[in-house]
Amino acid sequence: MEFEIGKAVLGGVIGTLAMTMVMYMGSMMMGLKMDMPMTLGTMVLPKGTGAWVLGMMLHLMMGTVFFIIYAALFQAFGIRSGVVGWSAVFGVVHAVMAGAVFGMMPAMHPRMAVAGGNGEKVPAPGYFGLKLGTMAPVAIVAVHVVFGLVGGVLYIL
């Protein structure tokens, strides 16, 4: 499959939107406090609507960059078939990397509460989101697989 930047961008944007919707639904169903757009936005702005909007823009941008990387890997490894499946596999790898980074977030996030969130503070997720709830690692992997699957489907269209 030839590298197609337009399809990679579309896959990244729509994959991130799908991932975020599943994250919010899963958070409600599992009682988790997962809100990646707010976490990203509060790195720059105080907690509120502005922070969420900025965080969502950052999340969409990051998702786009990551799916461009997925598409570049398809090209680099000569993946011509099974793109959707490979996208899911890349999603699992992506989730493992994200889970490791979550544990380091308090060191780089000025509004992250190390011992839990209150008011202005955003809760520290801990490695693989374990401070957000025992199901958080499963949710992190699941939403990244959704990202890969949705992005992969759009990429092969």
Image: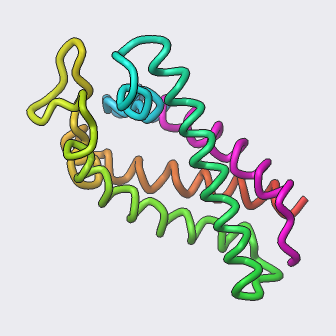
> Does 88 sit left or right of 81 as displayed?
left
Residues 11 and 32: in front is 11
**Which residue is located at x 48 percent, y 21 percent?**
52
**Which residue is located at x 26 percent, y 26 percent?**
122
The x, y position of residue 39, in whole percent, is: 37, 32
> Does 68 sit left or right of 31 as displayed?
right
**Which residue is located at x 77 percent, y 58 percent?**
8
Q: Quadrant of residue 18?
A: top right
Q: Quadrant of residue 75?
A: bottom right
Main SS, magenta residues: helix
> Does 150 sit left or right of 42 as displayed?
right
Q: Quadrant of residue 97?
A: bottom left
| Magenta stretch encompasses residue 129 | no
**Which residue is located at x 35 percent, y 16 percent?**
47
The x, y position of residue 155, in whole percent, is: 82, 60
- Screen quadrant of the N terminus: bottom right
The residue stretch that appears in magenta:
1-24
| Magenta stretch encompasses residue 13 | yes
The x, y position of residue 5, in whole percent, is: 82, 60
Residues 141 and 111: in front is 111
